[in-house]
């Protein structure tokens, strides 16, 4: 019997940064994928608000609710008890007030047994971050391309591509670090910016489309396995094409149903020996409805 995997915690991620060990981080939204992630020995799972697009078919992340995030986080935690799980704070779960932010962040721990929460934004969310930290909750920041506020960014566009916008990212990173966050995610920024911020901050800095120099990488599992088909960000590498495999399997099933090849004898149950003759006698009493 294989030894039970030990879940990594915050202090482990700091040691990994110090030792130059990369963290493997993916999203997961359901029980089966959570099981696959733990079996594949990932270090962290994000139950991202990207579930809005990957699970519910929304155009973006804005419609996602706290209740949806909690339900999916619960499923992932049951599937991956030995992985560090981060719950993603959806739109309007923390922007309105610090009190709302603490209550909603706390739900991820109380209801879904998450290890930490993630929220988007730089200096403008520092008050909420401090309030959540004061409640004893581990916080992962998220700057760069922040999908919840993509409208203000002019769409889902890379950030930090000019000196001016790169300075905003550095200032935000420093402000979040000073506020006390324990982890930081950089999304869709040039590798040079990702490298500088990673080396500048004493906390672990992870990237999704932020180059190779960050302390680890995050990918959305639906992109990684080729399941999500609406669009593919530049930073995604597909390691499988699940959509093609599943579509082909369903098509083959349909063809066999239509041709009469399925179900075959091996897919059918047999009556107990001697019961078929009794069944034939029994059905003689029935008449077809007119």
Image: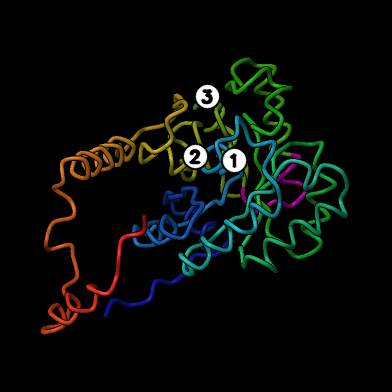
> Which one is nearer the viewer's eye here, 108 or 55?
55
Name the front one of labels 1 and 3.
Answer: 1
Task: Tell me which residue sits at (49%, 48%) in the image.
Answer: 27
Does the magenta run of residues contain 178?
Answer: yes
Q: Secondary structure at mark 1?
A: helix
Place of residue 264 in the rendered image (x, y in percent of width and height, measured from the top left):
13, 56
Residue 221, quarter of picture = top left
Residue 52: numbered disc = 1
Place of residue 42 in the rendered image (x, y in percent of width and height, measured from the top left):
41, 56
> Which one is nearer the viewer's eye here, 33 or 177?
33
Task: Tell me which residue sits at (49%, 39%) in the image.
Answer: 214
Alpha carbon separation for disc pair 1 and 3 = 26 Å
Instruction: Look at the numbered discs 1 and 3 and tell me whether their residues touch, using CB distance below 8 Å.
Output: no
> Which one is nearer the viewer's eye here, 189 or 219?
219
Residue 252, quarter of picture = top left
Give the side of residue 259 with respect to residue 76, left or right.
left
Indicate whether 103 appears above or below 277: above
Place of residue 26 in the rendered image (x, y in percent of width and height, measured from the top left):
46, 48
The residue at which mark 2 appears reads as: 214
Sequence-wise, the earlier of marks 2 and 1 is 1
Q: Which residues are magenta?
A: 175-183
Place of residue 272 in the rendered image (x, y in percent of width and height, measured from the top left):
16, 82
The residue at which mark 3 appears reads as: 190
Residue 198, quarter of picture = top right
Q: Secondary structure at mark 2?
A: loop
């Amino acid at each position: 019997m294989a030894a039970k995997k030990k879940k990594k915690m915050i202090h482990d991620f700091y040691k990994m940064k110090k030792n130059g060990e990369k963290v493997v981080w993916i999203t997961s939204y359901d029980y089966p994928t959570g099981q696959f992630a733990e079996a594949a020995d990932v270090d962290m799972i994000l139950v991202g608000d990207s579930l809005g697009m990957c699970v519910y078919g929304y155009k973006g992340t804005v419609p996602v609710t706290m209740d949806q995030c909690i339900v999916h986080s619960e499923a992932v935690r049951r599937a991956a008890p030995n992985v560090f799980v981060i719950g993603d704070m959806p739109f309007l779960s923390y922007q309105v007030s610090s009190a709302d932010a603490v209550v909603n962040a706390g739900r991820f721990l109380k209801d879904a047994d998450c290890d930490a929460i993630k929220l988007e934004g730089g200096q403008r969310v520092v008050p909420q971050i401090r309030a959540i930290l004061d409640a004893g909750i581990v916080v992962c920041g998220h700057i760069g391309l922040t999908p919840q506020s993509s409208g203000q960014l002019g769409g889902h566009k890379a950030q930090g591509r000019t000196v001016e916008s790169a300075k905003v990212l550095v200032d935000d990173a420093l402000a979040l670090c000073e506020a006390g966050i324990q982890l930081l995610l950089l999304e869709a920024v040039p590798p040079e910016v990702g490298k500088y911020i990673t080396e500048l901050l004493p906390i672990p800095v992870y990237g999704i489309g932020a180059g190779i120099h960050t302390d680890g990488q995050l990918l959305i599992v639906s992109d990684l396995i080729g399941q999500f088909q609406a669009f593919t960000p530049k930073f995604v590498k597909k390691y499988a094409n699940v959509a093609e495999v599943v579509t082909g399997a369903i098509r083959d099933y349909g063809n066999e149903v239509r041709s009469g090849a399925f179900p075959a004898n091996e897919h059918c149950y047999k009556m107990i020996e001697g019961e078929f003759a009794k069944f034939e006698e029994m059905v003689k009493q029935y008449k077809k409805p007119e």
